[in-house]
Amino acid sequence: MRNIGSQLELFTDDWLIAETRNVELRLHNPVPQEVSIVFNQPWEGNSSGYVTVFKDDACFRMYYRGSNHDLETGEATHPEFTCYAESTDGVNWVRPQLSLFEFNGSKQNNIVWSGVGTHNFTPFRDTNPNCPREESYKALGVGDGGLYAFKSPDGVRWQLMSRRPVITKGAFDSQNLAFWDNV
């Protein structure tokens, strides 16, 4: 018998199940529902992606890449950005006007990062009890030479933790997630 204490576990196989009397593992098909958010702002563009969502106390946080490409040439029409939205229910999302980064002469947008790492910026809340408050949120994002590390006190105002990549070996595509493991 395995003791997991009060830790939540996803049952994907029988590794944690002692017996299966009147129980079965069943994978249900996803059911399409309403659209939660449409990436339709000029800085979000037609090729937004790499969405990361996590629950943070009473708020859901969403981070995603804003990018736009000319449909005929495939060329980028503006730099990539990391954008932010939030929700109280995980269905209805708000893009806060953050005034942090300029796009087409205006800071009235929800851009939280511009520069290295925006292609697949993947944040998380650092639950390490010894984590300094100014580093409560962390992220990884790919750039020249590997993965760069970021920190933020509030999940909105980000800065690089190092001018050099912190991980240089590996295939860095999609979301490269890190997290604090208290085990």
Image: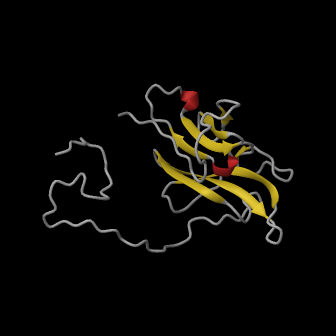
Q: Which residue: 65% across, 45% down?
A: 142
Q: How is the image coloured?
A: secondary structure
Asked whether residue 110 is in view, the answer is no
Count the marks. Answer: 0
Q: Which residue: 86% across, 50% down?
A: 105
Horizontal and vertical percent position of residue 97: 70, 50
Horizontal and vertical percent position of residue 61: 55, 50
Q: Which residue: 72% across, 66% down?
A: 46
Q: Which residue: 53% across, 26% down?
A: 132
In the image, is residue 105 above or below residue 27? above
Asked whether residue 183 is in view, the answer is yes
Q: Is residue 93 left or right of 20 when viewed as pictured? A: right
Horizontal and vertical percent position of residue 180: 45, 36
Q: Is residue 6 left or right of 148 when viewed as pictured? A: left
Quarter occupied by the C terminus: top left
Which residue appears farthest toward the right when viewing the image? 105
Locate residue 43: give its quadrant. bottom right
Q: Is residue 117 left or right of 90 when viewed as pictured? A: right
Horizontal and vertical percent position of residue 34: 52, 72
Q: Is residue 1 left or right of 96 when viewed as pictured? A: left
In the image, is residue 131 above or below residue 141? above
Locate residue 151: give its quadrant. top right
Which residue appears farthest toward the left when viewing the image? 21
